[in-house]
Amino acid sequence: MFTRPIAALLLLTCIPQLTGCTVRSTQRVAPREARPTRERVVGVTTVDGREVVLSRASQPFVRNDTLYATTQAGMPFAAAMRDIQRVWVSRTDLGLSALATIGGAVAVAGVLAAIIVATKESCPFVYSWDGAQYVFDAEPYGGATTRGLERDDWAALEHLRPVNGEYRLMVTNEVNETQYTNAMELLVVDHPAGVRVVPDEHGGLHALAALQPPRAARDRDDRDLLPWLAGTDRLIWEPAASPDTAGNLRQQVTLTFPKPAGATTAKLVANVATGLWGSHMIRAMLELWGRDVTAYYAALDTRPSARDSLLAWNLREELFALKVSVEEPSGWQVRGVLPGGGPFIAEDRVVPLDVSRVTGDSVRIRLNPPLGFWALNSFAMDFGASGAVRVDTLPLVEARDSAGSVRAELATADTSYYAMPNKGDHAYLTFRAPAERPGMERTVFLHSRGYYRLHLDAAGAADTVTLRRITVEPGAVARLAVERFGEWQLARQTPP
């Protein structure tokens, strides 16, 4: 079981035969660019749901559209690329002044799509010091693409460990964008063993002691998804952005949970992330504005009605917010909303649900994710009351980048931001760690607030026809994503 899956990460430059591309643009990776000492393939997930851990002593290679490797047990492994869903990668050098280790995955749709982390479309990377190295642990406020969309984010720091009474973080910009972080603090929760503490969308912390996995999970075609969705691991269900034979632009996921007698409320715990293609579509949709994108940003930043309209449209289309419907005697009723996140780290989130109208001994919930926009890892449900938690809020002690102290910019949420305009910008943060309480387990959350601006080529005219279509016509943006995915696949198959 893997406690921190990362939903798509890193260029597979350790395999010189691979044709690499990002979900932002198609490009070929020359063999001379390969740096096998920096990235290492550590495993694969197959389309039929098998996890294969690979030997760290040898590197896989691709020949004639087949991946060849050696398993951890020393056995030969070979699989056609069309049968591989993800390739998991470990990275051990950021090219910065500190060592970092990243575990990640690269999604595959027919052929291997190598995703370059340095050109992803969202938010800072946050690394936790585990006592020996910095480990990729959070990517806050994804989707907050301008100041009017600035938001708070809560992320569990699974790798953070105290060293000499301190917690240490590294915050980096590894993307072609400017990141504006308003504030960062740590929330420390000590709790009994066996209790999981999970935040909801608004930062409320829920202590859960009786989480139950789904009893059943089926897709639109009645395929069994339980192996993919029952646990947080390397089995991440993310269908490609290609419609089925009926032309459906959405999938349908129905989950069944046992329901205790008399239960009227429930807490759904979901571990999900923005899909790889959905992450790409953030840039694609902003580029539709052309040179008018500055005016578009200004409207979102200064007019609450513009922001509210965008959020309502996003919920209608379920691009980066997913409706949770509960089956009741009157039919399926929307009883909650699941926020997006990622795409590289999927965080657990609690979604409170009203199940008072549900009859029988089961609760069924339904999700209808548009193709390409969602990666679903696991779901569980708790019907008990949330236990009380004691939270220690840790303010920043020190924050420094190459120019000096940036503590004033990051200490409180105000009008002062810490800006990272360039790829490679990074800062180190220090917090004072409270003494651990005997007999208790500890969960540490990063509470951050901020936004970012993608660096766009905004010289052309706005595509007003497409903008109007995706705004007015329900489902049009999902169709646009599918069309763009088809174009991307065709470009990959066309020789340069």
Image (tube, rainbow, N blue to C red):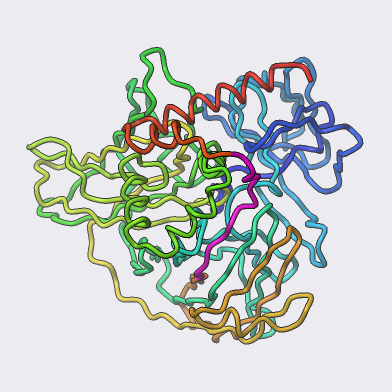
Residue 183 vertical placement versus 237 (above, below): below
Residue 217 vertical placement versus 457 (above, below): above
Residue 152 in the image, given as x and y percentages of width and height? 45, 67
Residue 122 vertical placement versus 35 (above, below): below
Q: Residue at x 64, y 43 (%)?
A: 459
Residue 42 in the image, given as x and y percentages of width and height? 71, 41
User: Position of 241 compared to 305: left or right?
Assistant: right
Q: Residue furthest top?
A: 245
Q: Is residue 458 magenta?
A: yes
Q: Residue at x 56, y 39 (%)?
A: 461
Is residue 286 or residue 389 the one in the foreground?
Answer: 286
User: Which span of residues is magenta-colored?
Assistant: 448-460
User: Position of 60 compared to 416: left or right?
Assistant: right
User: Position of 434 compared to 60: left or right?
Assistant: left
Q: Quadrant of the C terminus?
A: top right
Q: Residue furthest right?
A: 32
Residue 390 in the image, given as x and y percentages of width and height? 38, 80
